[in-house]
Image (cartoon, rainbow, N blue to C red):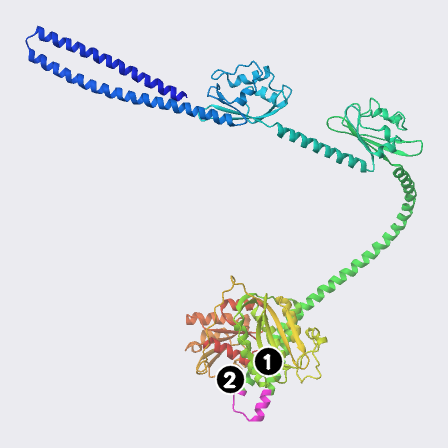
Amino acid sequence: MERNAVQSDGVESVIEALRYENEKLKKTNQVLIERVEQGWANYGDAYRSFQNAALLADKVKDRTIKLRRTLYKLEEANQSLSETRLESAHSQQRLLDTIESISDAIVLFDKNRKLVLANSHFYEFWRNTEAKIEVGVTSFKELTPMALEYGIYDPEGKPFEKLVQRSDVFRDSVIRLADGRWLQVSERPTADDGLVVVYSDITQVKESEFARQEKVLAEQNRILQSLIANLPLGVVLVNGERRVEAWNDRFANLVNLEPAKVNRGADFDALFYDSPLRSFSYSPDSSIHRGQRALFEAEQLLDDGRVIAIKSHLIPGGGNVNTYQDVTEQRRTAEALKNAYKHMEQRVHERTVELSALNHQLRIEIEERAVVEQSLLEAKGEAEEANVSKTKFMTAASHDLLQPLNAARLFATALLDYDLPEGVIKLVKSLSYSLSDVESLLGTLVDISKLEAGIVEPILDYFPVNELMRNLANEFQKQAEREGLEFSFVPCNIPVYSDSQLLARILRNFLSNAIRYTHSGRILLGCRRRADYLEIQVWDTGVGVPSDQLQEIFLEFKRVNAKKQREDKGLGLGLAIVDKLSTVLNHEIKLQSVLGKGSVFSVCVPYAGEAEYTFIEEETRIEPQQDPLSGKRVLVVDNDWSICEGMTHVLANWGCDVVTAQTLDDLRRKPELLNPPPDVLVLDYHLDDDATGLEAEVIVREKLAKSVPTVLITANYSNELRQQVKELGFHLLNKPIKPLKLKSVLVYLLS
């Protein structure tokens, strides 16, 4: 509305200016006409006067046209103003109709907080008063004093006090009217910095809230009364005016009051006039009456022998909670305990004397036990040292013993390649079998010694199980054929997570036992997929194991029906080693067997995760058309002459060109050893003067300026050496060497 008034004032100013300009032009025109007429009468230059009159006429015409255009615009502005005023009136009426249709009282103030308009619900508050509510006059600040003056607000209400303190505006407050109604007052600013105030009647909401609160209080009171009634103590709740609010029957019984005399609102102090406790009632100088917050606590002995304990606690808002408890039995018990304590003091003194003597005896025994314990510790240390010495001795002895055994085995293998008489061949085979048995027994004893000493640690890694199983199949197939047994191998392209060397030793023991205890039939090496692991199995059609000995055969020196089996030189340690290796690897061992039909030995190996090992399928190996060892140059380095001699005969029989060296100096000073360059190196790890085969490989690599495939042979079973050889990319063979295994490794390296 203010905008419309401003627009109207602007149009009126334009009209007034145009009128003034029009009058001015009329006067100018009149003066010009008079001057022209006078000029023609007084001067003889009529043509010049006529020319000036024509120019003036053109100017008058232009001014007249501009004036008409201005008058036209003025008429359009007047028309627009009329339409605006009409639309403003309609908008104001619609606003009035809108706020009138709302059930709440609504008031609109301008930026100066003057009343602009309000609906009838607002004026209803002032109907029966003499208050003057005028548009454009009454301000928002005047409403509060007027409401107080004419008794519209309830002056006792706390929300009203909040209103008076602010004295200007409040936002979303709740007030109470004098007629008992409740209003929620909400204030919101308008876009032109005005103010809209809405008064909503929430009387029903408040009444519902009061009813709910009363219900909650009643329920709380019921719960409190129920709680008090069920307490084992006598309880009474007293308000600030010393009136009874709540109690239980236990209270009346303890103070010898008739229940009918105790009621809500009764004078608490008057209840004790006829009670045995009245002499102990609360005097004016007691802590309760002084209003102190300290706990009031006392006991009183009654004439009937009872002892009553009394406690009183102050509560917020005034008043207190008093409790009464019959503690007669507790006091009697305490007295009895006091007497018993006096008696016990004498007993304790006597017992102390006895314990002192006993302590002296115990000290003597402790000292004796300390001496015995020290002796045991020393014995344990000596035993541990002996165990370590035994392990060192077994390791050293195994190396020294394996050297000649290894040479003898090589010589025996070389003899088999010669064209010998049948009887000699049988003797050589018997010699080879005997040497094999000795090597097996010695290796088994070394294994057991190291496993018991705890020096065997697994080197876990991810690898394809198929490669390990194929090598084992190649190694044991010929052994099975020599015994007249059929050997089958089922490939399995699955990666696993284990120590390949220790896992191979477990499977070798399975296969060795299968060949040893199977007279006829077949042996099968294969795998089965399980949910969480791969089960590698060795099947045989051997003698089987009795059901009552399935666990016993894994013990050291235990063999199944040893007298009934064919003659062999075993000690019964193979499965004991399997059991210890499975513990080291944390792989479960399974056994299924039917007596007289055969057995299935299994080891359960974890799968390799997909993110940890990516399996690359092995290419199909093409069998060479000719012996891959034929014509290959092999350099053998071993400090034992007999080993070099035996290795020369064996490798020569396989078609190899063999050269040997016994020291590192031979490699440095004899160029003919490396000319022509060897195709493969066979190196003993332990050489003279603490030198190693690894140092020999370094010399060869430096002289040839390239790496040569290397096989390292050793009696050292340590994990450190095995890991070192694996990282260098060499192949490791443990003594005693099995010629067929050596041949398979060389074929693999050279093919």
Residue situated furthest top in the rendering:
42
Taking the image as shown, residue 680 lies to the left or right of residue 449, namely left
What segment carries the magenta color?
Answer: 416-429
Residue under pointer 2? 649
Q: Front-most of 699 and 180?
A: 180
Image coordinates of residue 320 in percent, x first then y, are: 78, 28
Residue 261 percent location from the top left of the image:
86, 28
Residue 144 versus residue 237 in the image, above or below:
above
Within-10-Å neighbours for mark 2: few <14, some 14–19, many 20+:
some
Assess whether mark 2 and mark 1 are in contact (beta carbons under 8 angstroms). no
Q: Amino acid at mark 1?
A: Ile
Q: Is residue 30 magenta?
A: no
Please name the amino acid that badge 2 sits on.
Answer: His
User: Residue 548 location, x and y as percent?
Assistant: 72, 75
Say which element carries label 1: strand
The alpha-carbon separation of the residues under discs 1 and 2 comes to: 33 Å
Magenta span dominant secondary structure:
helix
| Sooner in the amino-acid sequence: mark 1 or mark 2 | 1
Quick one: quadrant of the C terminus? Answer: bottom left
Q: Residues within 10 Å of mark 1 (few under 14, many from 20)?
A: many
